[in-house]
Image: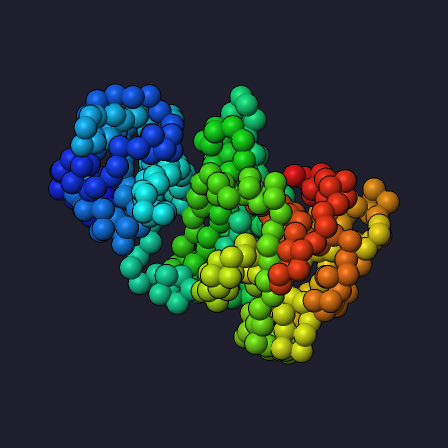
Amino acid sequence: MDVVVLGRTVRRCPVTEMGVPDQAELLEQLQGPVDGGQIDFGYGIADLLGRGVAEIAYRSEHSITLGSHAHATGTKLGREVGLLRVVMRVNVHRVHRRYVVSVSASLVAVLGVGLVEPTTPILRADDLGVTRGDGCFEGCRIQTTADGVSSVDKVDAHLARMARSAGGLGIAFDEAGWRDLISVAEASWTTPGEAALKLVLTRGDGETPTGFLTITPLSPDYARLRRDGLRVITLSRGTTSDAFADAPWLLGGIKTLSYAVNMAAMREAGRRAADDVIFVSADGQVLESPTSSVLWAVGRTLHTIPTGPNGILGGTTQHLLFERATEAGWAVRTVEASVDDLHAADVAWLTSSVRGPIDIVDLDGKARDRVPEVDAEVRRLSGF
């Protein structure tokens, strides 16, 4: 069995050389039966912590096991799905001086090619999507029934928005090709429940674009956030609410790959013990979250921020919610707002395509009362 870390095959050594403890929670994370044996990594635990992830490729006849100082225990982690080899990603994190191993499977398909093994190289080293963030993407939710039938939520809305993003970037967009690729992914993904599907389009080498999709399980944090709500802070985006007016080169309303600022904001939220962020303009207007739209309710009226010169991205889930809410007797408004308006709202949410609407329970350190019946209705109308 080959083990690859960041694309490099590593030498064989027992897991004990990595310093992984034989604690019960490690096996619980791996979710499997107990066998004997050893796992073959080649890096010490410090290397794994620094480098982030070991990719373990195998077929169904292989088993991956863990050895400990006292005894050997382990679990089989993979299976073959048709002709598609599933690759398990073993992420090793240090949490309170203990190592936690989390496992997830992924599917990869390439525009114009179809399904490929997840370890297949699909990007050039000089792809402009990698070197310059020159491209766009969409994040979607895929739902799979107990008998393995999958469907992607709001396909038309996501492809329409991606087409607008590609048009704003001047990158050719093959809608028919993307629909075919999504259909192949739906037919191949059979894991019951929810998962995240991402569509990615880059400028490629400058002449030929690169397109691909991935399917990965939902973040384990989503269940907690849906249950407990969001602790949110506001951060300045450093631009005025009309900064994108008459400046198409700023790419307002386009879902580009250039998310470094958004991710930096999320890390700042983590440093402040918060779950998420709402960006605010330099002149005090509420904008959006790094990965979500902002919604709030006052009585039976739902509100969101208008798109346009502020440069925010229109949300597909917010749009669907407003359509269904109108049919259900709600009033809906798009209106500029301040942070004080959010504090005064009955309920406020951040909503995205994969995570859905989640109510805000704390905003800038001020606790908010929850309204479960309103929250439940908004989730249902949003398809969650």
* Colouring mode (rainbow / by chain / secondary structure / one colour): rainbow
User: Can you give x and y, in whole percent of width and height, for residue 174 in the image?
Assistant: 51, 51
- Identify the residue shown where x is 23% and y is 51%: 46
Q: Nearer the viewer, residue 52 or 293?
A: 52
User: Can you give x and y, in whole percent of width and height, for residue 289 in the image?
Assistant: 59, 60
252 horizontally vs 373: left or right: left
- Identify the residue shown where x is 20% and y is 30%: 67
Residue 38, image quadrant? top left
295 lies above or below 132: above
Q: Nearer the viewer, residue 187 or 107?
A: 107
Q: Nearer the viewer, residue 354 or 50?
A: 50
Picture quarter with the C terminus: top right
Q: Nearer the viewer, residue 325 or 189?
A: 325
- Identify the residue shown where x is 83% and y is 42%: 328
Residue 234 visible from this viewpoint: yes
63 lies above or below 161: above
59 horizontally vs 151: left or right: left
Residue 336, image quadrant? bottom right
Residue 115 visible from this viewpoint: no
196 horizontally vs 241: left or right: left
- Identify the residue shown where x is 43% and y is 59%: 202
Picture quarter with the N terminus: top left
Residue 332, image quadrant? bottom right
Task: Count the labels in the image.
Answer: 0
User: Can you give x and y, in whole percent of width and height, for residue 51 in the image?
Assistant: 27, 53
